[in-house]
Amino acid sequence: FNVDPPMTAEDMNRWNDRFRWGQAAVNEDGNPRLRMEVNLDAGGVSQANFIDTLDMWERVLGDFLVHIDW
């Protein structure tokens, strides 16, 4: 995300302290980013689990957009 004014590591740490899913960081330009680890090893996941994971990502991303005032 390109934001103005730039965000800080402290802004991202507030997110990381508050939310379990989705790890936030900021790049050298002050632009935030968000990632969420997903385990697809050991033969994959069921369709229901995959759909649930996508739903969770959508919720996490929505909360993050609010956090960064996007």
Image: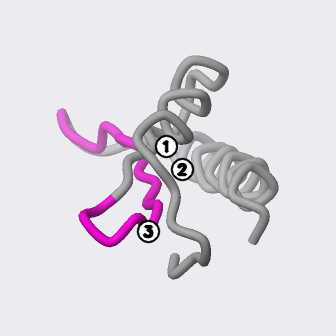
Q: Of the two numbered discs 2 and 3 on the same chain, state the one appearing first in sequence.
A: 3
Sequence-wise, the earlier of marks 3 and 1 is 3
Q: Is residue 36 left or right of residue 48?
A: left
Residue of label 1: 46
Mostly what secondary structure, the magenta segment? loop
Residue matched to label 2:
50
The magenta-colored residue range is 27-42
Furthest residue toward front: 5
- Please state the total of marks drawn on the protein image: 3
Report the residue at 56% width, 40% height from top.
11
Q: Does residue 32 belong to the magenta stretch?
A: yes
Q: Are marks 2 and 3 in contact (CB under 8 Å)?
A: no
Mark 3 sits on what residue?
A: 31
Q: Is residue 50 above or below residue 2?
A: above
Q: What sort of colour scheme is used for the picture? A: one colour
Task: Return the x and y of residue 63 as percentages of the image width and height.
Answer: 77, 48
Give the left or right position of residue 43, taking residue 63 as reference: left
Amino acid type assigned to the residue bearing label 2 in the image: Phe
Select label 2 or label 3 by which is in front: 3
